[in-house]
């Protein structure tokens, strides 16, 4: 699952140089898009222009940004997950 702090450039500043690899898991897609929608609701600048007849909801805009590869994300490593599990025991 992508963490809130793992999404690159949370304020929506300059676009990344290379597009992110396509997301093949629908669960990861939803998670990344939800985190991006949260950033947009908090005032981050959109990375896609909104056409006049385009989506009005920020959630739809976030999904379009993820589909276009404009949102970079990082997944926790297995070592991080195991370290958190042992530390909480």
Image: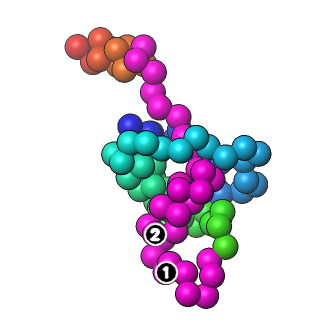
Q: Position of residue 82 (x, y in %)?
A: 34, 14
Above or below, 18 against 54 in this view is above
Query: Mark 2 sits on what residue?
Result: 60
Can residue 31 be spotted in the picture? no
Does the magenta stretch mainly form a helix, a strand or a loop? loop
The C terminus sits in image quarter: top left
Residue at position x 53%, y 54% in the image: 66
Above or below, 59 against 31 in this view is below
Q: Is residue 69 magenta?
A: yes
Residue at position x 65%, y 57% in the image: 12
Q: Is residue 18 left or right of residue 4?
A: right
Above or below, 35 against 46 in this view is above
Stretch in magenta: 50-79
Secondary-structure class at tag 2 = helix
Can residue 72 be spotted in the picture? yes
Q: Which mark is residue 35?
A: none
Q: Is residue 87 left or right of residue 8?
A: left
Residue at position x 33%, y 45% in the image: 27
The N terminus sits in image quarter: top left
Q: Position of residue 78 (x, y in %)?
A: 40, 17
Pick the front one: 4 or 20: 20
Callout 2: 10 Å neighbours few (<14), some, many (20+)?
some
Callout 1: 10 Å neighbours few (<14), some, many (20+)?
few
> Label 2 near label 1: C-beta < 8 Å?
yes
Residue at position x 67%, y 46% in the image: 19
Between the C-alphas of marks 1 and 2, the distance is 7 Å
Give residue 80's quadrant in the image. Answer: top left
Q: Position of residue 30 (x, y in %)?
A: 38, 52
Pick the front one: 31 or 81: 31
Query: Mark 1 sits on what residue?
Result: 56
Above or below, 1 against 43 in this view is above
């Amino acid at each position: 699952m992508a963490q809130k702090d793992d999404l690159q450039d949370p304020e929506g500043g300059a676009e990344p140089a290379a597009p992110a690899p396509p997301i093949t898991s629908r669960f990861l897609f939803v998670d990344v898009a939800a985190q991006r929608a949260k950033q947009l609701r908090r005032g981050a600048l959109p990375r896609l222009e909104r056409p006049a007849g385009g989506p009005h909801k920020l959630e739809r805009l976030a999904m379009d940004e993820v589909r276009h590869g404009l949102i970079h994300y990082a997944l926790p490593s297995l070592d991080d997950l195991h370290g958190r599990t042992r530390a909480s025991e």
